[in-house]
Amino acid sequence: MKILVTGGAGFIGSHIVDAYLQVGHEVVVVDRSAKKQYINSKVKFYPMDIQDKELNLVFEKEKPDMVNHHAAQTDVKQSLENPNETIDCNIGGTINILENARKYGVKKIIFSSSAAVYGDQSEFPIQEDAEKRIISPYGVSKYGAELYIMCYARLYPLSYTIFRYANVYGPRQQNGVLVHWIRKLLTNKPCVLFGDGKQTRDFVFVRDIVEANVLALTKGDRVTVNIGTGQETTLAEAFAILKNIHSSGSFIKQDQNEGEILRSVLSNTKAKKELGWSPKTTLKDGLKETYEWIKQNAV
Ligand SMILES: NC(=O)c1ccc[n+]([C@@H]2O[C@H](COP(=O)([O-])OP(=O)(O)OC[C@H]3O[C@@H](n4cnc5c(N)ncnc54)[C@H](O)[C@@H]3O)[C@@H](O)[C@H]2O)c1
């Protein structure tokens, strides 16, 4: 099968590309990034913006069977500063992909949505049908893209799997609290802890995310599922694991960012039922692998 992966030069997308190639698929990547270090040499790479009008030329030439859509403006803070840019990229870009998908007979789209569509919740773990209490333009853009995908799937013969990821971490990641801390530890600098460290997150390892994206090639038609561990970890607990891996470490406290969510953990019951997916990597093992990778690659 031929699969077009958008965002295939990025953290999660590049791992998915490697896995799809490994199980024998042909892969085409569209990514606007000039950074090519993680793009597998076996793919055909189109350095292009997903909002580009000429995206149709890629679809016309490649005629992909499926699209795995991971390209996005991913920075929540940037989305608050410049909401238009985020909406243009994440909703406008998705519509451009959907229009080409229907014109060129794509069978299915796999989409990377986010726990950001839930916003501020009071019941945990968060179920897929929880009321959406979004608190960032990034979250709105992800939810908007989900709605467009479902709309196109009703209008045209296009299937989908929508994944709402928790906090993903792992090798090749550039941003995120855990990789920032690892870089600080490796350079013997103090890590910054915002707030009291009691905020919780659901940290899911990138290899588990990849497995869900492989399963979605044959399962999970027309479903939206959370992809998280179901385990709530405080930032203080995550820091303690890293400190143990590095054998030392200190942190400095700073005021919590305004609007930061205090608790986040996703139910993965539906992912188990629909895809047979469950997370396999413990936070301890995933952090060890990420730490070793950053150490080896000095990034
Ligand atoms: N990392 C997480 O914890 C997390 C959590 C929830 C959802 N997601 C979603 O998963 C996807 C991948 O995230 P990531 O962490 O790998 O981010 P990333 O920034 O490493 O990768 C995104 C890639 O998309 C590309 N891109 C961005 N805008 C583009 C555009 N307009 N046209 C073409 N390419 C474009 C970037 O160049 C980059 O290579 C994103 O859609 C993100 O919203 C990530």
Image (cartoon, rainbow, N blue to C red):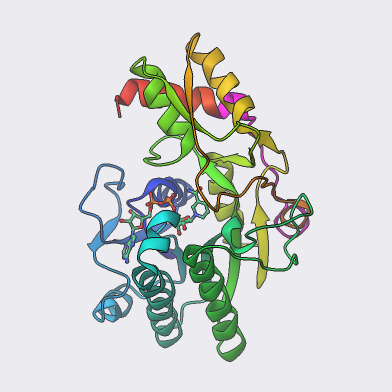
Q: Is residue 123 left or right of residue 294?
A: right
- The number of callouts visible is 0
For the C terminus, the image quarter is top left
| Above or below for 98 versus 242 | below
Taking depth in this image into account, of 164 and 101 the one nearest to the observer is 164
Residue at (74, 60) in percent of width and height: 274
View extreme (left): residue: 34
Question: Which of the 4 quarters of the picture holds residue 51?
Answer: bottom left
In the image, 291 versus 38, the foreground residue is: 291
Viewer-side residue, 151 vs 232: 232
Left/right placement of residue 87 relative to residue 202 reads left
What x and y, as percent, mark residue 170?
47, 36
The part of the chain drawn in magenta is: 272-286
In the image, residue 153 above or below residue 167: below
Residue at x 57%, y 91% (from the top left corner)? 155
Residue 83, image x and y in percent?
39, 69
Report x, y in % for residue 96: 37, 80
Q: Quadrant of residue 129?
A: bottom right
Classify residue 269 as left or right of residue 50.
Answer: right
Q: Which residue, as the protein is rendered here, is positioned at the far bottom? A: 155
Residue at the image point whose x is 75% and y is 51% from the top:
267
Name the spot of residue 114 as percent of width and height, x first. Answer: 56, 58
Q: Determine whether 281 is above or below 36 in the image.
A: above
Q: In which quadrant of this rendering is ligand 1 seen?
A: bottom left
- Residue 282 inside the magenta-drawn segment: yes
Q: Say which residue appears at 72% left-offset and 38% top-offset.
A: 231
Q: Is residue 47 magenta?
A: no
Q: In the figure, residue 31 lies in which quadrant? A: bottom left
Q: Is residue 75 visible?
A: no
Q: Can I make out residue 165 in this image? A: yes
Which residue extends farthest front?
255
